[in-house]
Amino acid sequence: RFMMRYITAGVIRAVFTILAVSVIVFLLARITGDPFDVIAPIDMSRADEAALRSKWGLDESVVQQYFSFLGNAVRGDFGDSFIYPTETSTGIIRDRLPRTLQLGAVSMVLVLVIGVPLGVLSAVRRGSIIDRLARGIALLGQSVPDFWLGIMLIWVFAANLRWLPTSGASGWKSYVMPSFVISIFGIAALLRLFRSSMLETLDSEYVKLARLKGLSRTRVIWKHAVKAASIAPLTFFGTLLTRILTGATVAEIVFAWPGVGLLAFEAANARDFPVVQALALFTSVVIVGTNLLVDILYAYVDPRVRLGARAIG
């Protein structure tokens, strides 16, 4: 009962957030200029101009245009692309999205496989060479710009060593450099979070009690301590997932990866308003939905959140 109230309140907040974002996305697309200027030929007659404005709904007031945009967005209809007139905005995104999801999945696996073990080992072997190496990786991962790292990787592994392709999506080798660029920040952040959480957990009384009961060090660390220490990084999971999806834009541009990140760059340069609006709203829904899911999972994992929800109820 109390959790249902907590979830319902989260869903209501998410809906209002998405509505607010839709207003911002709609207005920003028009602050940069009249969309009609992008699609209209210079020598168009007044009659043709009026017909074209009517076709795109640009002869209505801004308020009417927004509600038309919102109603169409609910149905998944963002209109035809300006630069790809034979395709709809939704269709273009649907075609490009699998590539971005594939790259994001590989990046997420790298984050979990590298970040979590390094964070745990760094805490368990505090002050050792492994700890210093892990902290160095965390520092570099959160300070090196993505675009610079991508260019350096291309220069070393593609241009000089010729081990990997410079761009495109042609086989498993194409995933290596862009997925590393996307995941390096997540690896560094998750490493630091797990290290700090593990240090706090290892000093807790119940971990010391588990050791006194005769449980092996490995079992205490990986079964008890890691489980307790994962509560804090769980709150970061939503931010990490959305960064991997949205942060893929830089990597896709640098490596010419045919995903929605590169599509967003191309659409913004060409002032393709329908595609830009669709991408912005889609990204916002992903971010809000992910954060809502993390809040719900966190409420189930951490009893303190459930107690807070019960107190509010």
Image: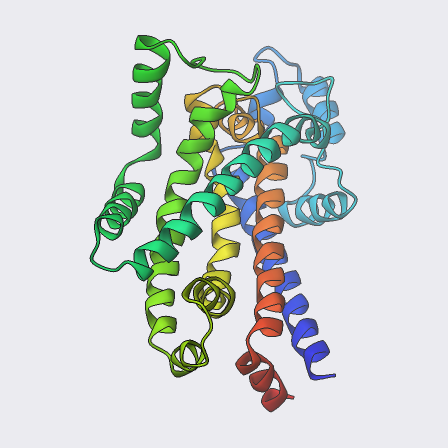
Which quarter of the image is occupied by the C terminus?
A: bottom right
Please determine whether, in this image, residue 132 is positioned above or below residue 251: below
Q: Which residue occupies the foreground of this view, 186 or 116?
A: 116
Please determine whether, in this image, residue 70 is positioned above or below residue 311: above
Give the colour scheme shown.
rainbow
Q: Which residue occupies the foreground of this view, 133 or 14?
A: 133
Q: Quadrant of residue 282?
A: top right
Q: Which residue occupies the foreground of this view, 248 or 132?
A: 132
Give the percent coordinates (x, y) of residue 206.
44, 81
Q: In which quarter of the image is residue 13?
A: bottom right
> Of all residues shown, which one is farthest toward the right?
75
Which residue sits at x=75%, y=48%?
Answer: 74
Please determine whether, in this image, residue 115 is positioned above or below residue 209: above
Q: Which residue occupies the foreground of this view, 186 or 38?
A: 186
Q: Is residue 258 left or right of residue 208?
A: right
Q: Is residue 217 left or right of residue 92?
A: left
Is residue 174 visible in the rendered image? The answer is yes
Give the percent coordinates (x, y) of residue 193.
37, 59
Give the percent coordinates (x, y) of residue 84.
66, 18
Which quarter of the image is occupied by the N terminus?
A: bottom right
Q: In this view, does 42 lie to the left or right of 164?
A: right
Which residue sits at x=74%, y=17%?
Answer: 86
Which residue sits at x=40%, y=12%?
Answer: 163
Is residue 273 visible in the rendered image? The answer is no
Give the percent coordinates (x, y) of residue 251.
44, 29
> Of all residues shown, which one is farthest toward the front?
214
Q: How many numbered badges does the structure rendering display?
A: 0
